[in-house]
Image (cartoon, rainbow, N blue to C red):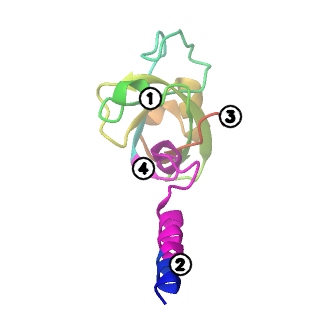
Amino acid sequence: MSRIALFIFTLLAFIAMAFGMPVPGNSTEDLEKRITHTGRGTWFNTGEGACGGWNVNSDKIVAISHLRWDGGVNCGQWMQITNTANGKTAYGLTRDECMGCGDGDVDMSPSLFEELGNLDTGVLSVSWHFKAKGWSP
């Protein structure tokens, strides 16, 4: 009887360990790309970005808030940005840090901003999320 009980206990312990193991590929970065953020979308004239290197206004560049900068862990990561007023969607590459942005705000190069709205507007209401690292449009 004790061998059967020991076998059942061991079997249940292995099953419990299997369910407790992390699933490969579900890192914080993978989960972050699924979170949709909302905020203001503005535009800026590009130049040398906080990620290093130079950008020009025709590049599809995004500067993320200094509140979410975290040492530049999102440098080189694409994001999908949607103008919540007209539904237009565009993709931008994270290449800079925005010191004047709130947590959910993004600052875009003029060419990226124009895919979502008119530069004369100056500020858009946007939603956005990071794409998986390594993804590109």
Residue 74 pos. (x, y %): 48, 31
Amino acid type indicated by mark 1? Val
SS of the residue at dot 4?
A: strand
Q: Which residue is mark 3?
A: 136
64, 35: nearer the viewer: 35
SS of the residue at dot 1?
A: loop
Judged left or right of residue 51, residue 86 is right
Quarter-of-image position of residue 93 = top right
The Cα atoms of the two marked residues, 1 and 4, are separated by: 17 Å
Residue 105 pos. (x, y %): 37, 39
The Cα atoms of the two marked residues, 4 and 2, are separated by: 50 Å
The Cα atoms of the two marked residues, 3 and 2, are separated by: 51 Å
Q: Which residue is mark 1?
A: 73
Residue 53 pos. (x, y %): 52, 9
Which one is earlier in the sequence, the residue at label 1 or at label 3? 1
Q: Residue at x 55, y 13 (%)?
A: 55
Examine the structure image and report whether residue 13 is included in the region drawn in magenta.
yes
Q: Report the magenta residues as a range.
A: 10-38
Amino acid type indicated by mark 4? His
Rendered image: mark on residue 37: 4
Amino acid type indicated by mark 3? Ser
